[in-house]
């Protein structure tokens, strides 16, 4: 898949993994780029969360969310990709949110994906190996979501059937 245009990107300053109403938002352009203005530099880590948008290659709606972690002292372009989403999801869930934790997560992920750690934040559209890894992640997440959706459906049917049996037996 390609870059995501027209995505709502928020600066999750409290690292709760949500776009709260008081947090800054912007919209991605046709290349998936986005800009936040008037950001105060600090040593604080924040999450950039990209929601929705349109895939520029398939022209299909992207009905999902992907994240990345950035330090507000860093300048330059931040990419939000399926790979950075894995890093961000682990970082947000961690009890310690510092550079050592981030580096630990990146090292573990790079080893598990068999990637050079220096490539984790690169653009998958410009690197065939990263693109393939990103597609594997997207496919796996869709698989897990599908399984979760089906197990919820099965559980709901089981509960309904059990309740129907209880009601039948009671009458």
Image: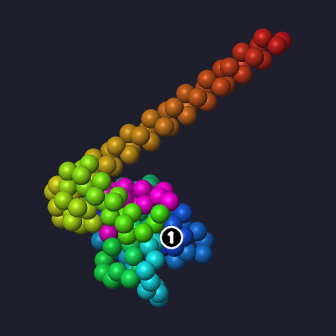
**Mark 1, secondary structure of its residue:** strand
* Image side of residue 76 versus residue 155, left or right: left
Q: Is residue 100 left or right of residue 165?
A: left
- Visible in this render: residue 100? yes
Image x and y of residue 6, in percent: 41, 69
In x, y percent, where is residue 169? 78, 11
Q: How many marks?
A: 1
Q: Is residue 50 left or right of residue 18?
A: left
Up-down: is 11 above or below 104?
A: below
Q: Which residue lies at the image location 29% right of the left edge and 71% below the top edge? A: 31
Front position in the image: 155 or 87: 87
Q: Is residue 79 above or below residue 152?
A: below
Residue 138 sits inside the magenta stretch: no
User: Does any portion of residue 54 appear in the rendered image?
Assistant: no
Q: Which residue is mark 1?
A: 12
Residue sitting at x 52%, y 77%: 24
Is 147 drawn above or below residue 53 in the view shown?
Answer: above
């Amino acid at each position: 898949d390609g870059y995501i245009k027209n995505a709502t990107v928020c600066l999750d300053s409290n690292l709760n993994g949500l776009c709260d109403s008081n947090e800054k938002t912007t919209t991605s352009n046709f290349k998936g780029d986005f800009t936040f203005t008037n950001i105060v530099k600090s040593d604080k880590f924040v999450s950039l969360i990209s929601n929705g948008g349109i895939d520029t290659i398939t022209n299909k709606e992207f009905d999902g969310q992907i994240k990345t972690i950035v330090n507000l002292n860093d300048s330059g372009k931040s990419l939000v990709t399926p790979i950075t989403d894995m890093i961000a999801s682990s970082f947000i869930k961690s009890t310690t949110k510092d550079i050592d934790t981030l580096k630990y997560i990146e090292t573990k992920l790079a080893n598990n994906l068999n990637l050079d750690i220096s490539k984790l934040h690169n653009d998958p559209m410009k690197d065939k190996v990263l693109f393939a890894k990103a597609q594997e992640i997207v496919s796996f997440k869709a698989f897990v979501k599908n399984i979760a959706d089906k197990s919820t459906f099965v559980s709901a049917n089981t509960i309904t059937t059990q309740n129907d049996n209880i009601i039948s037996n009671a009458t």
